[in-house]
Image (spheres, rainbow, N blue to C red):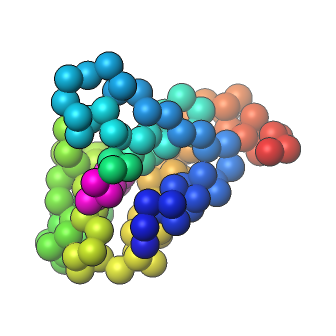
């Protein structure tokens, strides 16, 4: 998977938009981070220049199991290690599993939205 395929997949979910929120920081790596949002909450981010890993929301009870089972899954970079994981591309995590975990991250965030925000997602025609 390359950055364009990954980006297109993330944007395929209902109500998702992207933004690069760290353009003003000194760190080049962070400036190149693209975040994917549903409502006003992140569910995924990735560096678009390096494309080395993505960071995703994860259920705490699943996080440890995933990290134990895959070299390419680590605690979330710069995020709460209980709720976020980093998944490294081109290691031992198959692309299909990365997509599945992106979908789970999206669902975790959607479930955390208010009823009004969730209803807006289902009523939008985009």
Q: Position of residue 61 (x, y in %)?
A: 27, 59
Residue at screen point 59% across, 33% down: 39
Answer whether residue 12 is magenta in the image: no
Residue at screen point 67% across, 42% down: 15
Residue range of the region highlighted in magenta in the rendering: 50-60
Position of 116 with respect to 96 (left or right) is right
Position of 97 with respect to 39 (left or right) is left
Q: Nearer the viewer, residue 23 or 64?
A: 23
Q: Position of residue 115 (x, y in %)?
A: 67, 33
Answer whether residue 56 is magenta in the image: yes
Give the vertical position of 95 relative to 49 (above or below): below
Residue at screen point 23% across, 40% down: 29
- For the image, the number of numbered tags is 0
Name the outermost residue toward the top.
24
Residue at screen point 81% across, 40% down: 124
Give the vertical position of 87 relative to 84 (above or below): below
Whether residue 103 can be seen here: no
Q: Position of residue 5 (x, y in %)?
A: 52, 65
Give the vertical position of 71 relative to 122 (above or below): below
Task: Work out which quarter of the rendered image holds the N terminus and state it.
Answer: bottom left
Whether residue 84 can be seen here: yes
Position of 92 with respect to 9 (left or right) is left
Q: Nearer the viewer, residue 91 or 56?
A: 91
Q: Quadrant of residue 27?
A: top left
Task: Work out which quarter of the rendered image holds the C terminus and state it.
Answer: top right
Position of 11 with respect to 79 (left or right) is right
């Amino acid at each position: 998977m390359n950055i364009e395929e990954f980006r297109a997949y993330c944007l395929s979910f209902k109500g998702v938009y992207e933004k690069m929120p760290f353009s003003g920081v000194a760190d080049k790596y962070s400036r190149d981070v693209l975040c994917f949002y549903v409502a006003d909450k992140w569910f995924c981010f990735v560096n678009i220049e390096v494309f080395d890993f993505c960071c995703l929301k994860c259920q705490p009870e699943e996080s440890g199991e995933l990290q134990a089972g895959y070299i390419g899954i680590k605690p979330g970079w710069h995020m709460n290690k209980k709720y976020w994981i980093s998944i490294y591309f081109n290691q031992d995590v198959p692309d299909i599993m990365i997509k599945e975990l992106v979908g789970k991250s999206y669902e975790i965030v959607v479930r955390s939205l208010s009823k009004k925000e969730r209803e807006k997602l289902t009523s939008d025609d985009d």
